[in-house]
Image: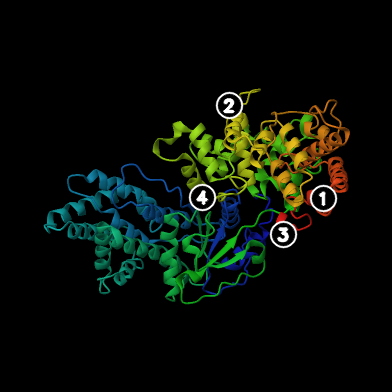
Amino acid sequence: MDRELYGREAVLHGNGLVARLAGLTRHAGARVAYEHGDDPPVTVFTGGRGMGKTALLKEIRNGYKGCTPLALIDCAHIEEPDDHGPGWTPLTGALSELAVQLAPKGEAVKPVQFPRLSLGLVAVASLGWSREDDERARRDLLRLGPLLATVDPGRAAAAGWVGRVLAKLAAAFTEATAPLAGQVAGLVAEATVETVVEEFFGRFLRQSENWYGAYRNAGGRGRAGLQQLAVDFAQGGRRRAEAESFLVGALTEDLLRAYTGLRRGTRIGRPLLLLDNAHEPLGRQLVEPILRARADGRRDRVVVLATSRVRDHEGLRNATRTRLPETAHRAPCPRDGRVGSGLLAVDLTPLTPTQARAAFDAHDPAGRTPADLSRAVHRLTGGRPLGVALLARAAGEAPAAVRSTLTPGGLLDLTVELREDSPPVPVAPTLLAELLPVPRPGPYAVLAAAHDEDSARRLAQARLAGEALDGDVALRVRDRLRAEDWTVAAAGAAHFVADPLLRALLLHRLRFEDGDHPRYAAWHAAHETLRRHYGPDPTPRRLHHDLALGSTAEAVAHFRLTFPEPDVLGWLGRLRFVASAPYPRERGATGPDPRRAVALGQEPDPGLPDGLDPDTTALHLSVRRLLHAVWLLTDPLALPDEEVAHRLTHELRRLSGRHLTGSGPLWDAATHWPRDIRAWRELSLPPGRPEDGV
């Protein structure tokens, strides 16, 4: 069953990018005009974790399976066989898996044979075989059975061929008197290939080995090329890389012959090679030989669709770049003399608010959750499809008693059923594990409370000393975040973990993971450490951690005392920063947010400090209401509150009338900050300058 596309229609619809590259619509297999003729680009979908790269490839596979030869592998997870010989590498393992997936007959596709790739992998598989250990040879040969079955299923299913290959090898070992290991490898490879050709290759396939005559030092002789390939593979280093590149060419050559051989005209469309996590080294090993061959003029008819978590990957430096919506009808990829110009890098864009609403409607068709919940989730997740989809599912599965009062923070506290045959899983830890797959997320959660690298290092020294056995914990966390392509704040930035969703999930773990209600010792220890780090003076960062600890008195006093100063924009900026502190939520709390009553002036006892005259008391209470209003309205885990937004306008206008010199910025803030909030933007500063605040 297809998933909802949620903005990926530009790739998958009837005249979308994949259809124009493959020449086929999905499912029905109707013909579509080729956009790039016989020279399709290697298309790489780029985006961070949770942007839907893997889901997109799986949708392509589901849509085109049976319509055209197709294979999907994850370049980050190629399973290594137990006790394999030296002829197995991630590249040879991937090539064998790709061929086995591409070969089968489908409803509208003929089977594909891979004789050239079979010969090459048989040759390199023979490395390390010896007369003393024919059991290893037997295991390696049986492992090649599914690949050889693409050439002749009947013979591959019979057990006798392995024994005949081993007997031929025994004779080869008797003749192998050369002192150099490379020469022995070549002789063993020759004997293996000769037997396999005799066993599996009919009259029309025997010429397949001639293709290896183009290999270095082969002089047009296929058997010599296969020998040299095995020798080079055994040598390792640059020579092995050359041999592996030639094996990639064998895969694409076999696919090309399937489209241009004796049955020419019986196939429509093009085969699809789907490579997930192609930013990994294996991805480059598979893609670069194809790019080089195409730059030299070879036309292989293979559509390569890959994904990369790293947008600015070195391998993409010469790619043509575009964004997903721009590919809906046309995706130019002009070539020049550079090999990398054959790459089309497509940035996967976040979901729009409308698409997030569609995801919520799919799981809550009756609309029993708050009307603004999907938009608030879009703000929290930044439109990251994985986050939107999981939180929408959680909303649809929420208990009826809490559904009407859900907030983004409340969604993180829920459980969600991802599989019918498995129990529900907690939302926040599940989403965090998907976005940050590290063995121990605890140190990351602690450091998410920090603002920049300096404060993160101080926090690590105080709270993570046991983690520092192999170096600076904060720097290790920083480097891992960068390796996962998460933005890490530069010195002086607002938060050490810059992505709002990842930071919210880590802070959720910091507060709730240890189940230490009502003390929340880990949360308090981290914020108290940072509070002490910033010293006794009421600086914005110190006051930020006061709020995270649930204490607002000193912040209110500070903003009251500094209100008369002439730098009103600075005052507003400090207020905005302090109020961005994470709120010390209670898990599963029901009823109105406690900040609401304070913002509206409805708390029974405001707890005024001693010694204030009536005018100062009025200023103090106004600042207090304003601080709590901004804190609530800008909280990504809360829902907007129109009454509080009106109160925000009222308080800022009253303060504008009180200030002797800076009434303009305060009046502008009263006009523009509520607009920013209703438009789901960060509060602009100066007010009304969206380019500075969005």
Q: Which numbered disc, 3 or 4, marks the residue that appears first in the sequence?
A: 4
Residue 326's label in the rendered image is none
Residue 666's label in the rendered image is 1
Distance Cα–Cα, label 3 vs label 4: 26 Å
What is the secondary structure assignment of the residue under circle 1?
helix
- Can the viewer see residue 369? no
For badge 1, the amino acid type reads Leu
- Residue 108 is left or right of residue 466, and the answer is right
Residue appearing at x 51%, y 50% in the figure = 482
What is the secondary structure assignment of the residue under circle 2?
loop
Residue tagged by mark 3?
Answer: 691
Q: Which part of the image, by quadrant, shows the C terminus?
A: bottom right
Provide residue 161's location: percent of width, then percent of height: 29, 51
Residue tagged by mark 2?
Answer: 514
Q: Which numbered disc, 1 or 2, marks the residue that appears first in the sequence?
A: 2
Instruction: Say if mark 3 contacts mark 2, CB within 8 Å.
Output: no
- Residue 458 is left or right of residue 83, and the answer is right
Provide residue 363's location: percent of width, then percent of height: 73, 42
Q: Which numbered disc, 3 or 2, marks the residue that appears first in the sequence?
A: 2
Query: Mark 3 or mark 4: which is in front?
Result: 3
Classify residue 430 by image quadrant.
Answer: top right
For badge 3, the amino acid type reads Glu
Query: Mark 1 or mark 2: which is in front?
Result: 1
- Can the viewer see residue 348? yes
Residue appearing at x 45%, y 47% in the figure = 77
Instruction: Say if mark 2 contacts mark 4, CB within 8 Å.
Output: no
The residue carrying pointer 1 sits among few (fewer than 14), some (14 to 19) or many (20 or more) residues within 10 Å by Cα, namely many
The residue carrying pointer 2 sits among few (fewer than 14), some (14 to 19) or many (20 or more) residues within 10 Å by Cα, namely few
For badge 2, the amino acid type reads Asp
Residue tagged by mark 4?
Answer: 482
- Residue 675 is left or right of residue 178, and the answer is right
